[in-house]
Image: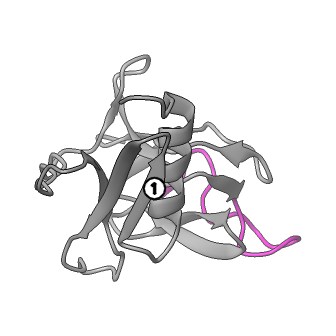
């Protein structure tokens, strides 16, 4: 991609994913990059799922393939994982001093709030995308998390 390095591209994609903008275009050293987000229809939980697509100019925007219907699987444990949909700070409870949304051993249902991720001063509720029992919580409250990082391991048979 010319003179724009991979770190900058990842940072720009993160900005688009974390914000309300649908498109970002940047021109640097004669190279132009356009990042667009296609918003999916709101699901039953009111979440706005979005995907960022990197489209070099002058190419036409391309559709981003839909995510698979199955929950992502953590290869180390062989269990489905609830993953972070954004970069931010993980919080296990709605406020300091309050009980955690879920603890290891708790049952969760699809759509149940399992944590909050603060990104750009916004508190984003993260919902379970699988039914089952929480086997392990992989992030600590107040800890920074990355996009796609596993936060919880869920046993769907538990």
Seen from the viewer's position, the closer of residues 102 and 55 is: 55
Seen from the viewer's position, the closer of residues 109 and 139 is: 139
* Residue 104 belongs to magenta span: yes
Residue at screen point 34% across, 83% down: 46
Which quadrant is home to the C terminus? top left
> Mark 1 = which residue?
26
Seen from the viewer's position, the closer of residues 24 and 100 is: 24
- Where does residue 123 sit, x and y in percent of width and height? 64, 74
Report if residue 135 is visible in the image.
no
The residue lying furthest to the front in this view is: 30
- Where does residue 55 sit, x and y in percent of width and height? 25, 48
Which quadrant is home to the N terminus? top left
Report if residue 148 is visible in the image.
yes
Q: Main secondary structure of the magenta part?
A: loop
Residue at screen point 36% across, 63% down: 109
Left or right for 124, reference 45? right
- Where does residue 9 sit, x and y in percent of width and height? 47, 41
Label 1 element class: strand
Quarter assignment of residue 118: bottom right
Residue at screen point 72% across, 46% down: 144
Quarter assignment of residue 38: bottom left
Residue at screen point 47% across, 30% down: 3
Mark 1 surroundings within 10 Å by alpha-carbon count, few (fewer than 14), some (14 through 19), many (20 or more)? few
Left or right for 96, reference 28? right
Which residues are the magenta region? Answer: 92-107
Seen from the viewer's position, the closer of residues 76 and 19 is: 19
The residue lying furthest to the right in this view is: 97
């Amino acid at each position: 991609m010319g003179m724009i390095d991979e770190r900058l591209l990842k940072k720009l994609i993160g900005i688009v994913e974390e914000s309300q903008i649908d498109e970002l275009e940047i021109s640097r050293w004669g190279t132009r990059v356009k990042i667009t987000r296609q918003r999916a229809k709101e699901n039953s939980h009111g979440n706005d799922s979005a995907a960022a697509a990197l489209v070099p100019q002058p190419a036409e925007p391309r559709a981003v393939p839909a995510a698979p219907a199955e929950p992502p699987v953590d290869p180390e444990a062989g269990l489905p994982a609830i993953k972070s949909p954004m970069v931010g700070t993980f919080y296990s409870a709605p406020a300091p001093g309050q009980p955690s949304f879920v603890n290891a051993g708790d049952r969760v249902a699809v759509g149940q709030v399992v944590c909050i991720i603060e990104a750009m001063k916004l508190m984003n509720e993260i919902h379970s995308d699988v039914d089952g029992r929480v086997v392990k919580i992989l992030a600590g409250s107040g800890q920074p998390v990355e996009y796609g990082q596993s936060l919880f391991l869920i046993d769907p048979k538990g």
